[in-house]
Amino acid sequence: MLCEQLIVPDFPTLSTHLTVADAMQVFDDHNLSFAPLLQDDQLLGLISLEVLEALDEKTALDAVPVRSIFINGSQHIYIALNTMTQAGTALLPVTSIEQQYLGIITYESLLTGLALLMDVHKSGGAIITIQMKKLDYSLSALTRLIESGDANITQLNTYSEPETDLFWVNIRLDRMEVSDIISTLQRYEYNVVHFWGNELYENELRRNYEALMNYLNI
């Protein structure tokens, strides 16, 4: 998913011919903390409400300091996530290679894009979290073991802890029953730290309980 697909339509912008008073009105009307400043269709940067509040209302916006933060529309969504995280901002202007302003990515549109990318709207499917050393990680080995249990990986994400050598693998499957897969992974000495799904013995207990209740009702 590309950054240009995350752009929020009709997000307010500011022009250099406006004054601080004009900009404050836009901020107030749309409940903004930041807004992109444009000169014609070229992005200059982000203007913050905090900066405006410290200036004279008659000051032209072309004299107001801006924060230079943007991303190219052809960049991947992960780059946008990293840029916004590093910058600590909830807005990210999107530009073309020629610095032409294309639109804005908001925190909400970024989350929506990530949810679509990770297919979190899809119901069902167990989730398994495995902890290991990074050197021990092998996608092909994990895939082989999981597919040996007649399951398929529908989503996989990894992350590492900077302060340790630990590597975390989150796997989503195409089925909920995971007891045989958990057993297989543990047999090969994988450290399964969490799972969300159904285990076979729970189903067996329920079936036995229901059979007993049916027997007692006879």
Image (spheres, rainbow, N blue to C red):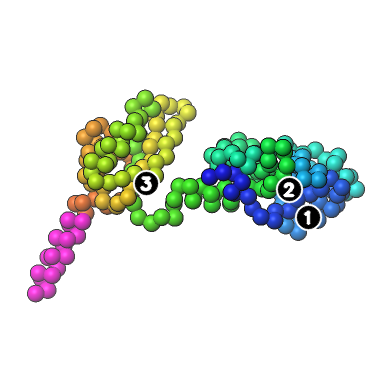
The image position of residue 172, as x and y in percent, is 36, 46
Mark before the other along the chain sequence, 2 or 3: 2
Give the extent of the magenta segment: 203-218
Dominant secondary structure of the residues highlighted in magenta in the image: helix
Mark before the other along the chain sequence, 3 or 1: 1
Q: Identify which amino acid the numbered label 1 is placed on.
A: Val
Residue designated by label 3: 154
Residue designated by label 1: 26
Taking the spot 37% from the left edge, 25% from the top edge, the residue there is 135
Q: Nearer the viewer, residue 145 or 206?
A: 145
Asked if the residue under mark 2 is in contact with the one under mark 1, i.e. CB atoms within 8 Å, the reply is yes
Residue designated by label 2: 35
Is disc 3 placed on a helix, strand or loop?
strand
Taking the spot 21% from the left edge, 51% from the top edge, the residue there is 200
Taking the spot 77% from the left edge, 45% from the top edge, the residue there is 41
Q: Residue 129: which disc?
A: none
The image position of residue 7, as x and y in percent, is 63, 50
Is disc 2 placed on a helix, strand or loop?
strand
- Taking 182 as reference, is 108 left or right? right
Name the quarter where the C terminus is drawn.
bottom left
The image position of residue 102, as x and y in percent, is 69, 46
- Taking 181 as reference, is 78 left or right? right
Is disc 1 placed on a helix, strand or loop?
helix
